[in-house]
Amino acid sequence: MKKFIYDIIKFSLFLFMTILVLVIFSLYLNNNIDFKIPKHKEILVVGDSRPECAINDQILDNVFNYSQSGASYFYSYLKIREIIKNNSHIKTLVLSYSYADLSKSRDKWYVGHKRINNYMPMYFPLFNLEDFIFLFKSNPYSVTITMPVLIKSIFIKNNQSNLGGYRHLKRDKLKEAIKRYKFNRALIKNVVYSKYQAEYLLKIYNFVQKKNIKLILLSLPIYNIPNKNCTKYNEFYKSFAKKNLNKAILINHSNFELPEISYGDLGHLNYKGAKIYSKYLKSSGILN
Amino acid sequence: MLFNSIDFAIFLPIVFILYWFVAERNIKLQNLIVVIASYVFYGMWDWRFLSLIFFSSFVDYLVGIGLSNKLNKRIRKLLLLISIFINLGFLGVFKYYNFFLDNFKEAFTFLGYSINTESLNIILPVGISFYTFQTLSYSIDVYKRKLEPTKDILAFFAFVSFFPQLVAGPIERAKNLLPQFYKKRYFEYNTAVDGMRQILWGLFKKIIIADNCAILVNKIFANYTDYSGSTLLLGLIFFAFQIYGDFSGYSDIAIGTARLFGFNLMRNFAFPYFSRDIAEFWRRWHISLSTWFRDYVYIPLGGSVGKTWLKIRNVFIIFIVSGLWHGANWTFIVWGLINALFFIPLILLKKNKKNTEIVAEGKVIPNFKEIFQIAITFFIILILWSFFRSESIKDAFSYLNIMFSKTIFRIPEVVSLKTVIFIVLLLLIEWLQRNKQHALQFDNINSKRLVRWCIYSVVIVAIMIFGGNQQQFIYFQF
């Protein structure tokens, strides 16, 4: 029995070393993600699915959209850090926000098993030790059991387009979404903020300040449906920004008027909406 | 809890340590650990299923005790019937109730009557067909006085619920497994190491072969009308390896795990795709089920002895029952029926036991006759799998109809080079190791530890990199 246990331990070490060597070798060979952005693109847009669907960077000549569905401020921070390191010509960072971005409900974007399982392997090449420890502390179980997926992703070449870009959304499900919407939601008393989101929003702010990059916090158009909590959340975000991000410019386009055909659903513009909205951004010069 | 999950990777070492270190010198305690571990393992699917396995075990334990008393023939028969009625009753309710009800309804509607009955919303308990047959074998063997009934309730519960083979076999005979729970188990280094190798090979077959094939098979079968005949043929080939990798992979993991605890389970697969006729295939595929039906259905019916029509009847019965065992769907019954049609000529010509030795034994390459026989048998099996995999008989015929059209000569639309390479690799390794119990049994390089460790590492790394998305084992549904 002793020999068996001893051999299992020795083999585990042998296997661990083999995998480690292969991982290091693969990281060296495969995972140099190219974050080079064309020189004329001086405005970087980062955020979740809303900017991903709303900002068509083919219409906006000087804008590069690197948003990705479901990306929390943690993953956005990793991306911003890497892009700016590789592109000193970036002058402005447009970071999207939606009314509930700082609320407690966003915590699941960090600690949720599915999120970790999907996003950690994808963003791992951008991690430093501190980032990894942060994620591990937030959900040690999920981080541990995602390791095989992570190793697999390291061996298979990552592609920077996986990490974001404008999404040509053809969805046209606004009417169905309105039907499904629960109008009689309970009114919240106090907004409890997400410590993870707040921490990484501040990190983004401090990072761009250090690099002398202008930060625009942009709330994108959403379908105007009565939501009493929305105002409360917006006020909360605004006061947080006023207190902690005083040099950032806050632009709220959540009530921006668009025809109904512009919406894929309640929270996202489809490609028709993206075209109208991007043209507006271009003509108004609001991002410059 | 799936064998190919992190949960099992945590569960197994814990049970192993408790079993060998905490309860090392005490058989009762070891059996108790097996029962608790098995109930935890099974309860993680749905704790409500535990009541079924508990009740089934308890009834058969009492039936065994009852049969041990000197009772007259009628009471003994009654006790056996109680065991059969309860075990097959569970199967009937959970697995076949809706199937038979729907068919009765359709038959009556066809005759112009309408009956008003409601189908039940029943979840099929995982592995019910496996442990029901296992516990039934105990009652039948005790009734036939082939086995002494046990008075050790813990050993009996451990025998019925033994977690490595609980949900998908091998379906153990009480004669083989139960006595192992009475004897003190000794840890044997070589057995445990070989068990680990068998687990590793099982994981390779499940995660690399079956899970990768599953993606292609699901795609092709879901839209088979859109594809060419060549793609459909490829779909069947992928399914043949999916089901083989899935089920034989599970069996390898089960047998290997049992060996870690000092138990020997029966072999369930013996490289079936190298068979030279359908009879040989059935001696090599799902051996524990085939031999169960042989011992408890076919031979009691008269087997291959007697008049020709009786032989034919017996073959039909065993294959139809086998088909029905796999699922409550006409596709499985037709699958069994067609198997019988291919089997009967061999029985009638007394050629069913022609190929009992290993193919091309002692040679690296088979001769042309053997290659031809293997290819023909594999092709027949492919046709049979189309019924097994299709949603309905109509779909199966339609699938075959498109497959055998002119488009069979087109270039297939769905191919995965990676999967094809791994299938070729599987065949190559299994061919070279076909005289062994499993493909990773390396007797001749026992002294070269580094070589062996490199081979294991390559397999593990390949599983990590090329493994498909985790899929449930196909045979759990049976």
Image: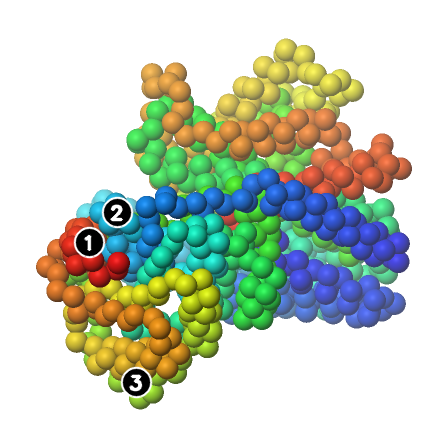
Vertically, is B341 above or below A50? above
Mark 2 or mark 3, earlier in chain: 2
Q: Are marks 2 and 3 on the same chain?
A: yes
What residue does disc 2 label? A61
- For marks 1 and 3, give the CA distance: 37 Å
Q: Which residue position holds label 3?
A: A188
Mark 1 / mark 2, whichever is N-terminal: 2
In contact (CB < 8 Å): disc 1 and disc 2: yes
Residue at mark 1 shares a chain with residue at mark 2: yes
Q: Amino acid at mark 3?
A: Ile
Residue B9 point in image, percent of width and height: 66, 58
- Are dots 2 and 3 in contact, CB under 8 Å? no
Three-letter amino acid code at the position of disc 2: Asp
Residue drawn 24% across and 64% down?
Answer: A220
Dot 1 crowding, Cα within 10 Å, few <14, some 14–19, many 20+? some
Q: Is residue B425 visible?
A: yes
Image-quadrant location for residue B397: top left
- Position above or below: B29 against A192: above
What residue appears at the point 73 percent right and 68 percent down from the top-left corner?
B33
* Residue at the image point whose x is 65% and y is 42% from the top: A25
How far from the left and from the top, in percent, is residue B326? 50, 45
Q: Find residue A238 and report its horizontal and vertical position in percent.
A: 30, 78
Q: Which residue is mark 1?
A: A282
